[in-house]
């Protein structure tokens, strides 16, 4: 069964920075077409900003192209109702991610951001890897 999952910014960053991470295993599954990834416009912007800041604009552009090629991007303009509904339940920086998950009925919000802990969809990378019946690595992320 191919899961449709929401991947938060930190999954992409940890996957790149830590090659033996569970996040890297998740990205490998994405690259092999074994999972379907959904991201929000905010995740797209955050990933690009990270790689521009810590690497360069070319690396940011490479990641932008990768995300647009491999993930379904949901734009904030399509989330107005859900953003209004969940506004006071989570920090503004996480609101678009949660709104995307709720709007699309996505079962897994894969992140290493504990701000999502109060929502049933939240799952850390290590636990998600276990959920798939795979052997997780030692780091939680």
Image (spheres, helix red, strand yellow):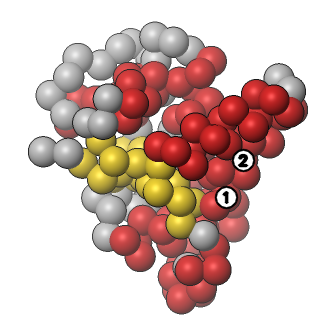
Identified at 19% across, 34% down, the residue is 132
Residue for point 58% across, 38% down: 66
Q: In which quarter of the image is residue 62?
A: top right
If the image is split into quadrants, where does the N terminus sit?
top left
Residue contact at pointers 2 and 1, CB within 8 angstroms: yes
From this viewpoint, is residue 66 visible? yes
Query: Would you say 18 lies left or right of 51 here?
Result: left
Q: Which of 72 and 141 is in front in this view?
A: 72
Check disc 2 and report its element: helix, strand or loop: helix
Percent position of residue 58, x then y = 81, 29
Residue positioned 28% across, 58% down in the render: 107
Q: Is residue 34 left or right of residue 119?
A: left
Whether residue 51 is visible here, answered yes or no, is no
Up-down relation of residue 113 to residue 50 (above or below): below
- In-image side of 61 versus 40 (left or right): right
Q: Residue 19 carries which label?
A: none
Q: Is mark 1 on a helix, strand or loop?
A: helix
Q: Which of 53 and 60 is in front in this view?
A: 60
Vertical placement of residue 139 versus 11, above or below: above
Tell me what residue is drawn at x 53 percent, y 24 percent: 15
Where is residue 13 drawn, in percent x and y?
A: 62, 30
- The residue that mark 1 highlights is 42
Q: In this view, does 138 lie above or below 39?
A: above
> How far is disc 2 from disc 1 in space, using C-alphas?
6 Å
Give residue 56's quadrant in the image: top right
Badge 1 crowding class, 10 Å Cα cut-off, few under 14, some 14 to 19, many 20 or more, is many
Q: Give percent across and percent down for residue 99.
A: 51, 72
Residue tagged by mark 2?
Answer: 46
Relative image position of residue 106 (x, y in whole percent): 33, 62
Vertical comparison of 30 with 122: above or below: above
């Amino acid at each position: 069964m191919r899961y449709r999952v929401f991947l938060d910014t930190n999954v992409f960053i940890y996957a790149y920075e830590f090659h033996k991470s569970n996040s890297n295993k998740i990205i490998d599954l994405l690259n092999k077409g074994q999972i379907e990834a959904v991201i929000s416009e905010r995740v797209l912007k955050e990933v690009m900003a990270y790689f521009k800041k810590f690497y360069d604009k070319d690396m940011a552009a490479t990641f932008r192209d990768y995300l647009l090629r491999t993930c379904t991007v949901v734009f904030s303009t399509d989330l107005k109702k859900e953003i209004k509904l969940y506004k006071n339940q989570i920090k503004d920086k996480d609101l678009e991610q949660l709104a995307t998950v709720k709007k699309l009925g996505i079962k897994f919000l894969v992140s290493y951001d504990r701000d999502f802990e109060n929502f049933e969809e939240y799952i850390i990378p290590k636990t998600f890897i276990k959920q798939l019946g795979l052997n997780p690595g030692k780091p939680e992320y």
